[in-house]
Amino acid sequence: MKGVRRVIVSRSLEEARRIVAAWRERGLLVGFVPTMGYLHEGHLALLRMARRECDRVAASIFVNPLQFGPGEDYLRYPRDEERDLGLAREAGVDLVFLPPAEEMYPPGFSTYIEVEGLSAPLCGRFRPGHFRGVATVVAKLFLLFLPQRAYFGEKDAQQLLIVRRLVRDLGLPVEVVGHPTVREPDGLALSSRNSYLSPREREAALCLWRALQAGRKLLEQGERRVSEIAQAMEKVIRAEPLARLEYAECVTLPGLEVPERAEGRILLAVAARVGPARLIDNLPLEVTPEGVATASV
Ligand code: AMP
């Protein structure tokens, strides 16, 4: 019966593995959505996409300690298990995997996945070890569930590209599907970390989206020099007193390299601290002699 699906909640790696393996053995198409919880419309868009495309949907909610650096927000990362389970149920999720950290990283854990190159620029410069933590947990979850499809948001474009490379390099039988960034009506990208923002900071956080728009506008006016585009984006963020710029860049897709001229598929990417929150945003574009169009990561 539609609408009254039961959601299975599992905290055990072995149990979750068995449940998903049984689905696969029955020939069902399994979609997987990894998250850190505190679900919002961005996560729900991924879950609904998986629900539409797959026979069974597994989601994980795991605040992954490996991807947080010392002094980052691991301990205060927002958590609300009850609410998340309600939302996952409404989105039609079949299994929510909620492992305790010891279940994922037993004592003596010492095996890591490193995706070289793509992990170095952008957020990699400011969060050493972050993408190693991401790649390790994603690889572990993929091997656990062996889903035919896995869904990731373009909001974390660098992460999506790293996961695609990881899957290709290791030959994992998983199709990685991207979903466009879900935004508030005023343009702010949804993020669990937006909950850290005061009303004033929430206003200030819009400078990321304004910076991306400024970059796009320059491109639309015919500017192709990447240095000019990056500077224009930087200027918008620097003009916001409550924001501290980390980076504002125009890089190639999918390689994340800094070209001299913005041509073909590019990514405008920004990061800034606003109050207690570190926020990122990006805009994938296709730049041709004819003009500028929204692209996907
Ligand atoms: P997180 O819980 O922040 O690790 O995010 C889990 C997944 O949701 C990742 O694939 C994110 O890229 C994706 N996601 C987070 N925010 C958004 C958003 N605003 N739009 C689309 N996807 C998102």
Image (cartoon, grey):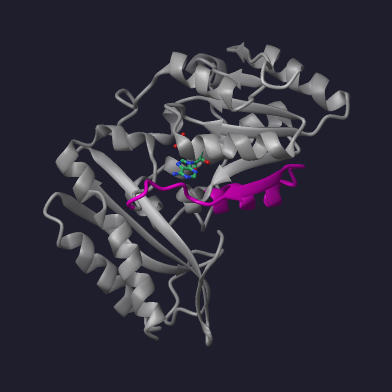
For the record, the magenta segment spans: 160-186
Rendered location of residue 287, percent (x, y): 51, 77
Residue 54 is left or right of residue 270, and the answer is: right
Tell me if 87 is positioned left or right of 142 in this view.
left
Which x, y percent locates residue 106? 54, 16
Viewer can see residue 78: yes
Q: Which residue is more in the foreground, 230 or 296?
A: 296
In this rendering, is residue 81 above or below 287? above
Q: Quadrant of residue 22?
A: top right
Residue beneath the point at 32% across and 50% down = 126
The image quadrant where one finds the N terminus is top right
Residue at the left extreme, as displayed: 241
Marker count (numbered): 0
Residue at x-position 23% and y-position 43%: 202
Whether residue 71 appears in this view of the structure is no
Check the picture and name the quadrant holding the C terminus: bottom right
Magenta-colored stretch includes residue 280: no
Left or right placement of residue 98 versus residue 69 in this view? right
Would residue 176 be counted in the magenta stretch?
yes
257 relative to 25, above or below = below
User: Which residue is found at the position 53% from the left and 34% from the top?
Assistant: 44
Depth order, front residue of 36/168: 36
* Residue at x-position 43% and y-position 82%: 261
In the image, residue 3 sits, relative to residue 241, either above or below, namely above
Image coordinates of residue 162 in percent, x first then y, are 56, 50
